[in-house]
Amino acid sequence: MAEKWTDARSAAGKRNPWLIVGVISLATFMEVLDTSIANVSLTHIAGGLSASQDEATWVLTSYLVANAIVIPISGWLSDVIGRKRYYMISVALFTGSSLLCGLSPSLPVLIFARILQGIGGGGLAPSEQSFLADTFPPKKRGQAFAAYGVVVVVGPVLGPTLGGWITDNISWHWIFLINVPVGIVSLLLVNAFVVEPKILQKERRERLKGGLKVDYVGFALVALGLGCLELTLDRGERDDWFASGFITTAAIVSVVSIIGLVLWELNRKDPVVNVRLLGNRNFAITIMFMVTTGAVLFGTTAIIPQMLQQVFNYNATNAGLALTTGGIATLIAMPIVGQLAGRVDTRALLVPALLLQAVALWYMSGWNTSISYGDASFGRLISAAGLPFLFIPITTAAYVGLRPDQTNDASALLNVARNLGGSLGIAISQAALIERGQYHQDRIVETLNPLNPEYVTGLDQLGRMIGGAADGTNAALAALYQQVQQQAQMLAYVDVYFGFMIFVLVIAPFGLFIRQGRGGGAHG
């Protein structure tokens, strides 16, 4: 049975708990902004550091791998180091490594700095969610997560636009250097206003009584398992997946290590990753939904602007702006969900939100090469309006039925699920786009042969429209091939949207099994 909620574990102490939301939002914004801000600057980074485009992608991969390794062990680190102290170390490391990124004279130095930045960034979100879960009673927790979620949503929306503007008008170095003043202010505010409750200090002393016991095997298995998994998902499409020995090896090491991690940690009294939490049916279901949310959110966020650039020849700025409407819808929906989350059955929010995602994806699967900018924005608007009704209820429901001392571990696993879902969504969608694009191109080309009278007539007419006999024929073939590629790419994107829709519809019924917090226990 969960204990009755008290403010004994609150990070606000005797202060207004909403102050904590404002304080931790600074570091949150800095980290989520930086996750997406570097993407649009890779070409400039490669040119500035005399590296190839492929070599420059390690700037992204190195951060993601370090992040993936640290997040699952962040709960253990919080318990051992102290939650406030660990959070401040994470902010300081992220800020200092951002300075090193901005001053990097070469690509190897930048990649090393990004690894440090990923280690620091990995400790932020789990600690922040733990702060909120312990600081707010169950009835107000939805509102707190909604306010926190606003920052999480604004960062990725502004990141590409801000990164592009800074790179074009100042220098790519400043996409990292802008973190420094924000990080310093965050450290000062956390030190002044965030409290380390006495009960957490007591639990830490009891834990360390008799010396610190470090699960070195668990650490190694986490690093190998999740590090290699992130490497496989992030580099797989670039390196032709399992045709690459490197990717194949990374995938095998990942699978073996993750299986070994689960078996090892189940038999540890003090596990570095508390996989036993997955034995709680409610928590396991929320983890599944967090993976789904991450896959849909990050997957569609990546491929919609990509589609607009590849198929419709939008520039990067206009393609990014097509997502802005969705960001506005999410911001409007966040406070509404916050008010409802503590009063309405979680299932009544979650299941309709999943069905709304399915509707948005069904709308996107009806797109063709004639859609307008408004059509693309409207599709994103439908999807984004429903995201808060997924993110907040899932996060709130995850803590229902858990003991107060399991908050740190639960927050860590929730963030692992979100990041893993995002990586899976992006990797699977990119692989599907290549495979389905080739499939549709082959089917279209089958009908384009001299034995097809419509093909001969159409090519002849197109050649006359373009000009001269030989030159006109060659130009007509080039124009026709360009149309074939465009149609094949568009059909591939439609297939991916349809696949996401089926995935969401299959997952949606499981939302009926999520427990509803009653508000009386420590975690509902």
Image (cartoon, rainbow, N blue to C red):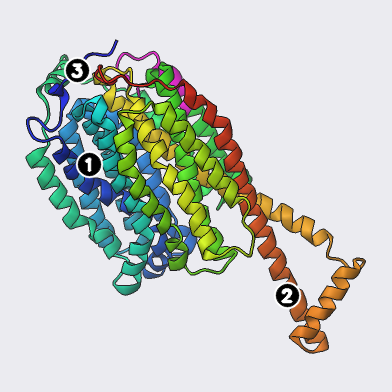
Relative to residue 319, is residue 343 depicted above or below? above
Q: Could you tell me the amino acid type at mark 3?
A: Arg
Relative to residue 55, is residue 261 depicted above or below? above
Query: Mark 2 or mark 3: which comes first in sequence?
Result: 3
Mark 2 Cα-neighbour bin, 10 Å: few <14, some 14–19, many ≥20: few
Q: Residue furthest top?
A: 1
* Disc number for residue 90: 1
Q: Is residue 513 left or right of residue 505?
A: left
Query: Mark 3 or mark 1: which comes first in sequence?
Result: 1
Residue for badge 2: 478
Query: Where's the N terminus, which quadrant?
Result: top left
Q: CA distance from mark 3 to mark 1?
A: 22 Å
Q: Which residues are magenta?
A: 258-274
Kindly indicate the quadrant of the structure image that contains residue 51: bottom left
At mark 3, the secondary structure is: helix
The verdict on residue 262 being magenta is: yes
The verdict on residue 108 being magenta is: no
Q: Could you tell me the amino acid type at mark 2?
A: Ala
Residue at image position (62%, 45%) is 498
Q: Is residue 287 left or right of residue 2?
A: right
Q: Could you tell me the amino acid type at mark 1?
A: Ser
Residue at image position (73%, 58%) is 441
Give the x, y percent position of residue 251. 54, 37
Give the x, y percent position of residue 154. 32, 52
Q: Is residue 461 left or right of residue 64?
A: right
Q: Are marks 1 and 2 in contact (CB under 8 Å)?
A: no
Mark 3 Cα-neighbour bin, 10 Å: few <14, some 14–19, many ≥20: some
Give the x, y percent position of residue 68. 38, 39
Q: Nearer the viewer, mark 1 or mark 2?
A: 2
